[in-house]
Amino acid sequence: MNTSHKSPRDRLVSVTLDEASIGAGTADQEHERQIAIYDLLDENFFALPGRDNGPYSLRISLHDAKLALDIRDARGEQAAVHVLSLTPFRGLLKDYFLICESYYQAIRTAVPTQIEAIDMGRRGLHNEAASLLMERLNGKISCDMDTARRLFTLVTALHWKG
């Protein structure tokens, strides 16, 4: 996606996860979530096609096992709500959690080449999930790959098992 002509309004300035939706995470997972929010707010491209009422605030939650994205405009008024089925993400989420568990174990005990190999697999799954998220949001929300990757990290936070 070409974001070189984006408006300064095409961005997120606030991201929150619904506390009731968040699964209890490990320290590593909580750290990943905080980094994702920080990085997302630091640099992102997020727009609602046909609208110019950003910058936006985003609240991410789960409702009936579906992803709910509540988007507020610069005045705090609801600009859009998108509810997505997570069924297409189930296999990716399962694989992502397994590889993340391996990664967290490896960084404590494995040699650097093993860690790098696991991390490459983790990044590959993350990219695949971000691409799927962009595809599922097509026509509803425009975002770049880095923004989609960070959003997927936050989607995973809703599924962590403590």
Image (cartoon, rainbow, N blue to C red):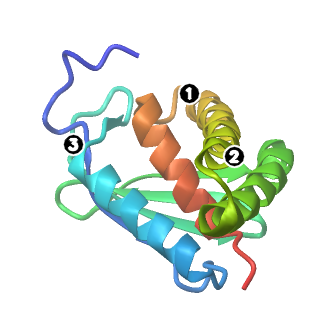
Amino acid type, callout 1: Asn
Badge 2: residue crowd in 10 Å (few <14, some 14–19, many ≥20):
some
Q: Secondary structure at mark 1?
A: loop
Residue at image point 63% right, 27% down? 135
Which percent across, then down, holds residue 48? 37, 36
**x, y (%) of residue 38?**
30, 61
Q: Is residue 8 above or below residue 105?
A: above
| Helix, strand or loop under label 2 | helix
Q: Tell how many labels.
A: 3
How many angstroms separate mark 1 from mark 3 (CA)? 19 Å
Q: CA distance from mark 3 to mark 2?
A: 46 Å
CB-based contact (under 8 Å), mark 3 and mark 2: no
Q: Would you name the residue on which mark 3 appears?
A: 53
- Residue 138's label in the rendered image is 1
- Mark 3 vs mark 2: give the one in front: 2
Q: Amino acid at mark 2?
A: Gln
- Picture residue at 64% right of the left edge, 85% below the top: 24
The label number, if any, that marks residue 114 in the structure image = 2
Across and down, in percent, residue 114 comes to 69, 46
Select label 1 or label 3 by which is in front. 1
Quadrant position of residue 2 = top left
